[in-house]
Image (cartoon, rainbow, N blue to C red):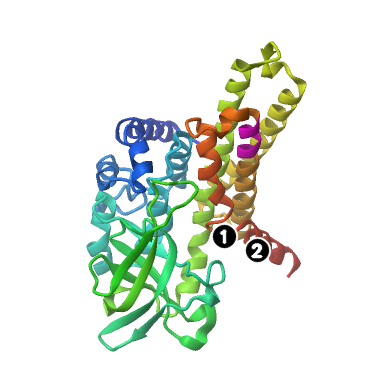
Amino acid sequence: MQRQIFTEEHEAFRETVRTFLTKEVLPHYEQWEKDGIVSRGAWLAAGRQGLLGLAVPEEYGGGGNTDFRYSAVLAEEFTRAGTPGLALGLHNDIIGPYLTGLGTDEQKRRWLPGFCSGETITAIAMTEPGAGSDLQGIRTTAEDRGDHWLLNGSKTFISNGILADLVVVVARTTPEGGAKGLSLIVVERGAEGFERGRNLDKIGQKSQDTAELFFNDVRVPKENLLGERDGAFIHLMTNLAQERMGIAVAGIAAAEHLLEITTKYVKEREAFGRPLSKLQHIRFEIAEMATECAVTRTFIDRCIVDHSDGTLDAVHASMAKWWATELQKRAADRCLQLHGGYGYMAEYPVARAFTDGRIQTIYGGTTEIMKEIIGRSLLA
């Protein structure tokens, strides 16, 4: 079906993204995978190309465009290229809104120009060894010491954790406040007592640096509080819909790309003297995945438009996230199976898509959490 949500400007931006991937990412990606980290030069190149800070006001060096469809284009093209390691979506769509929406004028002047140029790489530190989706389980504390915050605790599974120059840390500022006693504290590279642990060895997305972070009596200036004290819960809930939409967009794009490369493969690969595509079982598998992708694409595109208009709610974002990522997971498994033994070879795109995409149903809120959000809204 012909998609109808993009204009000529969006498609021109898509060509810009593709050119950037061809010149600045794909020639280096295998090395980044081996190194377990992308180069800082790639971030600087993204900044020069105008791919960072799409929604940041122009006065700070950004694109000044809050149309989420541009972010969707970026997510789709990076997904189809198989290059999730350069986490521009995390930077732009997850962390960016905290800085632009909650930052004071002074904070924006201090942080956003580097954010847009690629000189300042960002991360958000929520997850702890004993606390994932449950914010009440967060143990990292920020104690008010008058002229500074004293930060203590640890975080894990932090994307961009090694490269990050600016880390938005979710910390407990009121011990008895439960999930509502949390604040956002911004820690900058070089702060005394801020240490990085391992660059974690994952089964996929090898070039995306994912780290442990440790905070040992870190003195953070009072002016690095982002948003309201004890307001992190509301701040986080406000921005989660966009995070989940970014993941959903990547999910359906991945499923469609897997279908595309597998359809081509079964037409070319022969078994029992004829192409695999001549076998009824193969045709049925392709037909089922094509139908699931078409139906899902229609819903996701509607959610993209609604989010661009500011009308998408948390429930529909949760629907989009769990459905698209579970479809991606199923498609990766089925497409790998249709590739046979070759699907298990790392040199084949379907193999990397299988391991890279497995995290999609977990981060940004697990499938189970998404269903809980939807269920509560219907049965409250």
Q: Is residue 320 left or right of residue 156?
A: right
Q: Secondary structure at mark 2?
A: helix
Q: Is residue 360 left or right of residue 15?
A: right
Of mark 1 and mark 2, the one earlier in the sequence is 1
**How many badges with numbers are in the image?**
2
Badge 1 is on which residue?
Answer: 365
Badge 2 is on which residue?
Answer: 373
| Residue at x 50%, y 32% (from the top left corner) | 349
Q: Secondary structure at mark 1?
A: loop
Location of residue 151 (image quadrant): bottom left
Look at the image and give the residue range highlighted in magenta. Answer: 331-337
Contact check, label 1 and label 2, Cβ < 8 Å: yes
> In the displayed structure, would residue 240 be above or below residue 323?
below
Q: Is residue 6 visible?
A: yes
What crowding class fits label 2: few (fewer than 14 Cα within 10 Å), some (14-19), or many (20 or more)? Answer: some
Based on the picture, tell me whether residue 257 belongs to the magenta stretch: no
Q: Amino acid at mark 2?
A: Ile
| Residue at x 58%, y 22% (from the top left corner) | 265
